[in-house]
Image (cartoon, grey):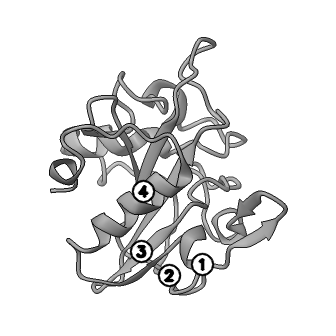
Amino acid sequence: MVMEDYFGSLNISSFAEFFNIIKNLSKYMRNTGYCSLETKYTKCPAGFVYETAGSTVSCPIMKKKYKNYTGGTGSVFFNDGGMLLSDGSYILFDIDSGHDVKKDENDEETHIYVAVDVNGAKKPNRYGYDFFVFEFGRDGRLIPSGSEDTVFTSEKYCVDSNTSEPHNGFGCTERAFIDHDYFKNLK
C-alpha cells in the first residue's frame, strides 16, 4: 500500500521524505502513534527516549535494553522513529545516509531499515531472537536482512561466535523465515 502511495519507488533524498513515509505507513496500521524527529519524538514506544545532541539523535535504550545475537552490547541503530502497535510490538526505523554500515567499499546508497520487535518490551530483546531487521531494496521491496541483497548478510551479521559486533543478529531475519528449526536451535 505504501508503495502505491509512492508510485512504486522509494527514492528518499531527505529526512522529511522519510518521515512522510513513516506517517503514511502508520495510517495502514493499528498503532498508538508514531514518533520521529518530525513529531519531536512524542508518542514514542514505552521506554524509548530519544536524545538529541546537535544534529545527532540517539536512542540510548537500543544500546542499554537490546543485546546482539550472542548477548553482547547492542547497536544504537533505529533512532529515526518508531511505532508502538496495538498488540504491544514495536516497528522501528533507521535511514542510514551516513553509511555507518556499508555493503562494500563502493556503497554510496542511502539505506532504509525497518525493524520489528515482535513482543515489544518483553524479553529477551535480542537481535535475531525477537528483533528482526528488514531493508528496503532499490526497487522498493522490503527484504529480510540476511539475504545477499542486503547490507546485513547472515554470513557476517548472524554469527554464533561474534560477541563484539553490535549489529550481530541484524542478519538473522531471512534465516528465521526459511529455517524451520531456527527458533528451536536458539541458545
Of mark 2 and mark 4, the one earlier in the sequence is 2
Q: Are marks 2 and 1 in contact (CB under 8 Å)?
A: no
| Residue 41: numbered disc | 1
> What is the CA distance from the residue labelled 2 to the residue labelled 1?
10 Å
Q: How crowded is mark 4: few (under 14 residues within 10 Å), some or many (20 or more)?
A: many
Mark found first going from the N terminus, 4 or 3:
3
Q: Which mark is residue 45?
A: 2
Q: Which residue lies furthest to the top in this view?
A: 106
Task: Looking at the picture, tell me which residue is in the foreground, 101 or 183.
Answer: 101
Give the CA distance from mark 1 to mark 3: 11 Å
Q: Which residue is drawn at 46% across and 61% down?
A: 19
Residue indicated by mark 4: 115
Q: Do the residues labelled 3 and 2 touch (CB within 8 Å)?
A: yes
Residue 30 position within the rendered picture, expressed as x and y whole percent measured from the top left: 23, 81
Q: Name the residue under label 3.
A: 83
Q: Residue at x 60, y 78 (%)?
A: 41
Q: Quadrant of residue 36?
A: bottom right
Contact between marks 4 and 1 (CB within 8 A): the answer is no
The residue type indicated by label 4 comes to Ala
The first of marks 4 and 1 along the sequence is 1
Question: Mark 2 or mark 3, which is nearer the start of the sequence?
Answer: 2
* Camera-side mark, 4 or 3: 3
Describe the element under mark 3 as helix, strand or loop: strand
- The amino acid type of the residue labelled 2 equals Pro
Mark 4–mark 3 CB contact (< 8 Å): no
Q: Distance between the residues labelled 4 and 1?
A: 17 Å
Residue 66 x %, y %:
60, 64
Helix, strand or loop status at disc 4: strand
Give me the C-alpha separation between circle 3 and circle 2: 6 Å
